[in-house]
């Protein structure tokens, strides 16, 4: 595809979803190209993927939210980025940032939203003895893990499920759901 949408991915950690997006974006017909990766965590393992795949990246501290957002916007505008994917990015973006950016922002969350917004999702799901959990890709607004849902995938919870096994089971689905959601937005 010649005119891929210039995209930035925000991360805070391991970056396994980032890897799935990098791999998909290298396919000819996938609608986006990743032109920039921003991490608010200097130790994020995902930054190694940026190096490995030769994608421009920046660490920008989010200790001060205003400065973080201003610096991000500077980097994003400089590269004419038109789409933003949050992939394990553990901060809430302000309304001002969302409107100043002015293009679509999407996020992936490891639960069947609107249930279990926020942190420690898997332990809360297990504590409530849910029979199902899953993952959700949604548009981002200035509230935590809300915004219109794009796609969801449900998984069943086994009797002997642990926090870690559930996390891994859901991550496997996330890695498919995130690229599928991007295809569905731009088709
Ligand atoms: C993923 O499970 C993602 O859904 C979750 O963090 C993990 C990041 O893993 N995101 C959130 O909880 C956002 N509220 P990764 O760094 O390996 O992609």
Image: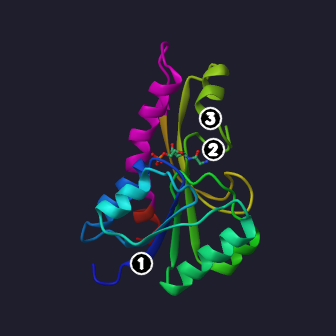
Q: Is residue 156 visible?
A: no
Upstream in sequence: badge 1 or badge 3: 1
User: Where's the C terminus, which quadrant?
Assistant: bottom left
Q: Residues within 10 Å of mark 2 (few under 14, many from 20)?
A: some
Percent position (x, y) of residue 181?
45, 58
Residue visible at 69% across and 54% down in the picture: 146
Q: Nearer the viewer, mark 2 or mark 3?
A: 3
Which residue is tagged 2?
113
Res 99 visible:
yes
Viewer-closest of 140 and 180: 140
Among the two numbered marks 2 and 1 on one chain, the one whose residue lies closer to the N terminus: 1
Q: Main secondary structure of the magenta part?
A: helix
According to the picture, the residue beneath numbered tag 3 turns out to be 121
Residue 9 colored in magenta in the image: no
Q: Nearer the viewer, mark 2 or mark 1?
A: 1
Q: Which residues are magenta?
A: 155-181
Within-10-Å neighbours for mark 3: few <14, some 14–19, many 20+? some
Q: Quadrant of the N terminus?
A: bottom left
Q: In the rendered view, does 28 fall on the left or right side of 78? A: left
The residue tagged 1 is 5
Identify the residue at the far front of this view.
42
Question: Is label 3 within 8 A of ligand 1 (CB to nearest ligand atom)?
Answer: yes
Q: Secondary structure at mark 3?
A: helix
Location of residue 23 in the rendering, given as x and y in whole percent from the top left corner: 30, 59
Q: Mark 2 and mark 3: span between their CA atoms?
A: 11 Å
Q: Nearer the viewer, residue 35 or 182?
A: 35
The residues bearing labels 1 and 3 have C-alpha atoms spaced at a distance of: 32 Å
Extreme residue toward the top, this view: 160
């Amino acid at each position: 595809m010649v005119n891929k949408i210039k995209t930035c991915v925000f991360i805070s950690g391991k970056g396994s979803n980032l890897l799935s997006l990098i791999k998909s974006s290298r396919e000819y017909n996938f609608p986006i190209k990743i032109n920039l990766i921003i991490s608010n965590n200097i130790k994020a393992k995902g930054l190694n993927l940026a190096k490995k795949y030769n994608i421009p990246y920046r660490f920008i501290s989010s200790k001060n939210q205003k400065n973080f957002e201003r610096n991000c916007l500077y980097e994003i505008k400089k590269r004419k980025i038109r789409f933003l994917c949050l992939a394990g990015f553990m901060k809430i973006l302000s309304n001002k940032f969302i409107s100043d950016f002015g293009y679509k922002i999407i996020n992936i969350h490891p639960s069947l939203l609107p249930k279990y917004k926020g942190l420690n999702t898997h332990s809360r799901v297990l504590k409530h003895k849910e029979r199902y959990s899953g993952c959700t890709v949604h548009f981002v607004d200035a509230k935590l893990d809300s915004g219109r849902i794009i796609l969801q995938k449900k998984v069943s919870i086994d009797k002997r499920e642990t926090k870690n096994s559930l996390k891994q089971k859901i991550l496997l689905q996330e890695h498919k759901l995130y690229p599928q959601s991007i295809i569905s937005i731009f088709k």
